Amino acid sequence: MLCRINSNNQILVFLCKKYVNLLAFFCMAMTIVQAKNLQIEIAPIFDERPLAAHSSGALDSGFSITRLDYLLSGLQFQTKDDEWIELRNWFGYFSFEEARNTVAIDAPPGEYKALRFNVGVKPDINASDPNQYPPSHPLNPQVNGLHWGWQGGYVFLAIEGHYKKRDGSLGGFSYHIANDENLALVELPFEFDSERHARIDLALDASLLLDGKHRIDILETPSSHSRPGDSVVPDLLENLRTSFRVSNLSSDTYHSQSSLSSYPDANIVSGSTPYRLHVTERFPKVEFPADNPLTEEAVDLGEILFNDKRLSKGEAQSCASCHQADAAFSDTLALSVGVEGKPGKRNSMPLFNLAWSPSFFWDGRATTLREQALMPIQDHLEMNESLDRVVEKLGQDEHYPSLFKAAFGSPEITPDRVGLALEQFLITRISQDSKFDLAIRNETTLTDLEKRGLELFVTEYDPSKGLYGADCFHCHGGNLFTNNRFANNGLDYTFADVGRQAVTENPADVGKFKVPSLRNVALTGPYMHDGRFATLEEVIEHYNSGVKPSSTLDPNLAKHLPTGIHLSDSDKKALVAFLKTLTDVSLQPKTSLASTFSN
């Protein structure tokens, strides 16, 4: 049995051949599990911005789009030799309202210079019995809601919404493209390699659909249903053929937005723009807070607040002071120094991939990000400010009321809203583009030393079975490189800081602290909850020979007592080399926003 990242990647093959049983867990965690090998997403946009269900467009005051649904068929790829290869019996249903934007396909291997598809279905399919399709099929009427029932045939594309009439009252528009003669072929020239690229991002610009080559006059003709002699449909069809474009190629694949989030767009503040995250399918699916849907406006506000020193007493520090972007949003000091010049009690934890964390801080005392975000502001050893004073100071700035209105629908500034905005910004700090990730995606290769470090990382230390690894994966396995639990990792015999026990009051939790992610670990020193180790080499030596026994010591460490794991100097260097492959240089904020209020 072989364990491969995909058919071309050789990074873990030699490991899995030799250590099948030991690496089964890790290999499953690291493998991109896909039944299909190419993902295509078509993002609905309006005038280059993500389409929001209740936002005003550029056509008329009060204009909004509430529905943009369509059927695709006949997907084809053009080879370098100008041959078109068609996927047989392929159909796709896309829905703006349902956030159904992504399909996965079996793409024929090769290099291509264009793709094309039909908006709609061919006459034989259009005339066939729609009830023949299984429950999940794109052409099942219960799935797409685009079959005309008694009239027969499918609606190929439906775009609907509201507009303001000349007298100021609310009107509705509804445009439906249907009937065999209105099947539209869309062709998009661009070069891609189906063996190298795992994802194609397209966009459908609704502003061009209604106001492209031809302007659809909603005031004069607010509806069209593709009946004979309908003058709007030819204009819509010409606009449609040029409304799609290619926006990006990627070697990774991502969860669809609907699989990541439990909130519907209907909960988003009117006029705001949904924030669409790209999260690799190698990460577990996750639900974002249902009562705090991500929007561009709230995320931007959260970033501005994160960098604003007015959140602290004397306007001396911002959140970013102790969570620096170039240190993976952690601090370079063992214990951060607060506004009063006093050191804190624990090392500042890095801030990324927090959507997957069930609790926060080293002891897990906060259960939500919004709660966590407000605690340092009020902590006497940190920012030492009251929330009432924060609200007062922010209210004196001429910009903040409009920023809060854009994010939350009204200009009121409250502590809860400060926490919600910070929560949104922190959720978007996702680390998934390290050298290790690039190697999985066949964009680079690990060196022999890094491969040896990976082998040690995922191998137990059990001399009785001939195993001499570093045994890291029990606590740091999987693509998040943490189990998000609490553990006593043998730092002390007795504990001045009791850790998790202070929260649970359970003696079984004494000396336990949250297991941090090893992503970006080369950037986040000093290490441990008290910053006692300055280098990765010191950390590795602790686990190699320095683990101290106590009643709550993690069993996976206790089993190595009293001798340790006897890593050689070359093995220690290999582990450090592998850990450095987990550094994600793309984990940076938008500097233009970050500096707006950083003072």
Image (cartoon, grey):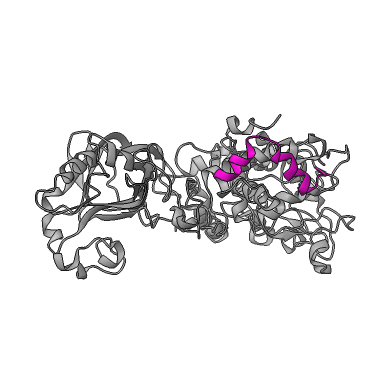
Q: Position of residue 219 (x, y in %)?
A: 27, 44
Is 408 in the magenta? no
Task: Choose top left, top right, bottom left or bottom right for residue 100.
Answer: bottom left
Whole-percent x and y of residue 517?
A: 65, 49
Q: Nearer the viewer, residue 597 or 30?
A: 597
State the count of labels.
0
Is residue 56 among what the camera can see? Answer: yes
Whether residue 394 is in magenta: the answer is yes
In the rendered image, which quarter contains the N terminus? bottom left
53 relative to 301 in the view: left or right: left
Q: Is residue 512 above or below residue 14?
A: below
Residue 348's x, y, as percent?
A: 76, 44
Residue 143 in which image quadrant: bottom left
Name the one closer to the observer, 265 or 39: 265
* Residue range highlighted in magenta: 382-406
Foreground: 376 or 328?
376
Quadrant of the rendering where the C terminus is positioned: top right
Where is residue 232? Give x, y as percent. Answer: 18, 44
Give the residue displayed 29% in from the left and 48% down from the top: 107
Vertical comparison of 141 with 77: above or below: below
Depth check, front residue: 345 or 368: 368
Point 37% across, 57% down: residue: 35
Report if residue 570 is visible in the image: no
Secondary structure mostly seen in the magenta stretch:
helix
User: Residue drawn 83% across and 67% down?
Assistant: 505
